[in-house]
Amino acid sequence: MARRRQPSGRKRRTREHVIADMSANFVERKVLECGHVLEIRTKDYGLDATLVTFDADGEIENGFCELQFKATDHLKVSADGTTVAQRVSSRDLRSWLFELFPVILVVYDAVEDRAFWLDVQAYARNPGFDTDDVRTVTLRVPFSNAVTVEAVQQWRVLRNRVRRERSSE
């Protein structure tokens, strides 16, 4: 019979820590394949990373996208199989809605090594969306929004649209 090791009392790296790092690594790889940079935050106040992009000549572009990662071993799929349900704190969500540039929520499925994304600010513009008087909100992330190299380019397009709108104000 195998003896169980006595706990040492030291801090432990949990599965949640591992898959959180895997989610950042998954997205960063797609970003790097596009020639861009993902700046991972070491101090997390509701956002995990910033996407910095470069044009075809390698020159940095103004503006950025903010990203929040959620990693899981138990993806919550809708009954119709078209979306992933992800709970987020209303406090974080309200903060994201006041960001000037796009905020992208990324849900990472560690079991299948895949991820899906949601433009949080666009999602919040849907009729009936409300964060008042609740502690958490369940967001529906479409399966069709797989995190790919094309998705990273789409985030860049979203950011450019916001940048153009702001410059015309």
Image (cartoon, rainbow, N blue to C red):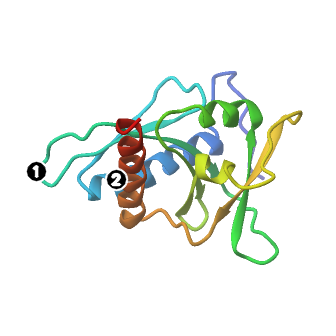
Q: Is residue 13 visible?
A: no
| Mark 1 in CB contact with mark 2 (< 8 angstroms) | no
In this rendering, is residue 148 above or below 51? Answer: below
| Amino acid type at image mark 1 | Asp
**Along the viewing direction, whichever of 73 and 151 lies nearer the viewer:** 151
Residue 51 as seen in the image, left or right of residue 79: left
Q: Position of residue 9 (x, y in %)?
A: 69, 21
For the image shown, how many numbered marks are present on the structure?
A: 2
Q: Position of residue 84 (x, y in %)?
A: 70, 63
Q: Residue furthest bottom?
A: 80
Which is more N-terminal, label 2 or label 1?
Answer: 2
Q: Residues within 10 Å of mark 2 (few under 14, many from 20)?
A: many
Asked whether residue 163 appears in the rendered view, the answer is yes
Residue 73's quadrant in the figure? bottom right
Relative depth, front residue between 107 and 4: 107
Q: Is residue 67 above or below residue 98?
A: below
Q: Nearer the viewer, mark 1 or mark 2?
A: 1
Q: Looking at this view, is 138 or 71 the one in front?
A: 138
Which residue carries the number 1 mark?
57
Residue sitting farthest toward the right: 133
**Image point 29% across, 52% down: which residue?**
32
- Secondary structure of the residue carrying tag 1 is loop
Instruction: Estimate how packed mark 1 is, as few (under 14), some (14 to 19) or many (20 or more) residues with alpha carbons within 10 Å.
Output: few
**In-image side of 134 versus 88 (left or right):** right
Badge 2 amino acid: Val
Secondary structure at badge 2 equals helix
Which image quarter: residue 165?
top left
In the image, what residue occupies the spot 36% across and 39% down?
168
Q: Residue at x 87, y 36 (%)?
A: 134
Q: Which mark is residue 31?
A: 2
